[in-house]
């Protein structure tokens, strides 16, 4: 199994981090991202890990976000500048911020055996959560760790709307000499280009029509008029206004909603 197609949420600052305790102001969650290194002496730059102030099984580091994420795996690593690491831990998580669950009913998950080797654990099933916590159970010398959480790529809907798309007044759609199918194509550009081809719903919001035969004298036939979105791309589409049989359209206006997942 691989994390190559997953999002490292800590590295990308997609979550907020909070801890139970910090050893001091330079041993905090700000030092906890996987493979973190200070680049300065420890006395100046702080630890190369989050380090708890209290050594008991009530310690934790929580990653949380406003929107739920689908977590697939986590990776854990020891402190880079001292022989301190977590040898086992459990995972807790919550979707609503009130009701917490324990992964595998709180069963211990194997951690690290040295400072820098990364141990990756893939969850039995993806975990849907707003907040997820690593809770150390056993450790070498001190509770210290660096970590990463990997989540599925999230897709969000992006919607754009347009109004009053019109073929203009008194076009071929209003002809009294031509009968049968007639159409006018109107080029429509989206205000912002979509990442992928969107789905479009387009409807007629204004219809100025009549129905007549070729001589314009029989006004009791059925009116046949419609609009479609065709040739859709990420940049726009063509609005196809059309009538058929003896229908005549002096003017038409359409509105659209375009949506894609990005």
Image (cartoon, rainbow, N blue to C red):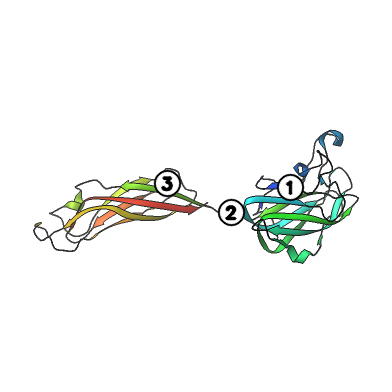
The quadrant in which residue 3 appears is: bottom right
Q: Are marks 2 and 3 in contact (CB under 8 Å)?
A: no
Q: Give the distance between the C-alpha atoms of the residues marked 1 and 2, in whole angstroms.
A: 23 Å
Q: Which residue is drawn at 76% across and 66% down?
A: 105
The quadrant in which residue 119 appears is: bottom right
Q: Do the residues labelled 3 and 1 touch (CB within 8 Å)?
A: no
Q: Dot 2 corresponds to which residue?
A: 154
Kind of element beneath mark 3: loop
Q: Residues within 10 Å of mark 1 (few under 14, many from 20)?
A: some
Q: Give the distance between the C-alpha atoms of the residues marked 3 and 1, in whole angstroms.
A: 43 Å
Nearer the camera: disc 3 or disc 1: 1
Residue 142's x, y, as percent? 88, 49
Q: Residue 235 carries which label?
A: 3
Q: Dot 1 corresponds to which residue?
A: 18
Q: Is residue 44 depicted above or below 251 in this figure?
A: above
Q: Quadrant of the N terminus?
A: bottom right
Q: Evaluate whether residue 8 shows in this view.
A: no
Q: Is residue 188 depicted above or below 130 in this figure?
A: above
Residue 239's x, y, as percent? 32, 51
Q: Which numbered disc, 3 or 1, marks the residue that appears first in the sequence?
A: 1
Kind of element beneath mark 2: loop
Q: Residue at x 46, y 50 (%)?
A: 159
Q: In this view, does 230 lie to the left or right of 95?
A: left
Q: Which of 70 and 77 is in front in this view?
A: 70
Q: Which numbered disc, 2 or 3, marks the residue that appears first in the sequence?
A: 2
Q: How crowded is mark 3: few (under 14 residues within 10 Å), some or many (20 or more)?
A: some
Q: Is residue 233 left or right of residue 261?
A: left
Q: Which residue is drawn at 84% across and 43% down?
A: 23
Nearer the camera: disc 2 or disc 3: 2
Q: Which numbered disc, 1 or 2, marks the residue that appears first in the sequence?
A: 1
């Amino acid at each position: 199994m691989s994390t190559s197609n997953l999002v490292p949420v800590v590295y990308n600052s997609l979550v907020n981090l909070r801890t139970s305790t910090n050893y001091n102001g330079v041993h905090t969650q700000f030092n906890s991202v996987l493979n973190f290194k200070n680049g300065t002496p420890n006395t100046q730059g702080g630890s190369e890990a989050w380090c708890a102030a209290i050594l008991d099984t009530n310690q934790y580091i929580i990653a949380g976000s406003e929107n739920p994420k689908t977590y697939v795996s986590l990776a854990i690593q020891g402190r880079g500048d001292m022989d301190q690491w977590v040898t086992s831990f459990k995972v807790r998580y919550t979707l609503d911020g009130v009701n917490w669950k324990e992964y595998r009913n709180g069963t211990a998950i194997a951690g690290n055996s040295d400072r820098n080797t990364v141990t990756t654990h893939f969850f039995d099933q993806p975990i849907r959560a707003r907040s997820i916590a690593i809770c150390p159970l056993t450790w070498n010398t001190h509770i210290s760790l660096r970590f990463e959480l990997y989540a599925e790529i999230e897709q969000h809907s992006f919607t754009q709307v347009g109004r009053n798309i019109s073929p203009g007044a008194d076009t071929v759609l209003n002809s009294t000499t031509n009968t049968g199918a007639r159409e006018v194509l109107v080029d429509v550009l989206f205000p912002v280009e979509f990442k992928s081809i969107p789905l479009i719903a387009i409807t007629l919001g204004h219809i100025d029509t009549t129905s007549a035969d070729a001589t314009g004298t029989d006004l009791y036939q059925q009116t046949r008029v419609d609009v479609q979105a065709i040739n859709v791309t990420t940049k726009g589409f063509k609005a196809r206004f059309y009538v058929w049989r003896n229908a005549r359209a002096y003017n038409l206006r359409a509105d659209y909603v375009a949506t894609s997942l990005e």
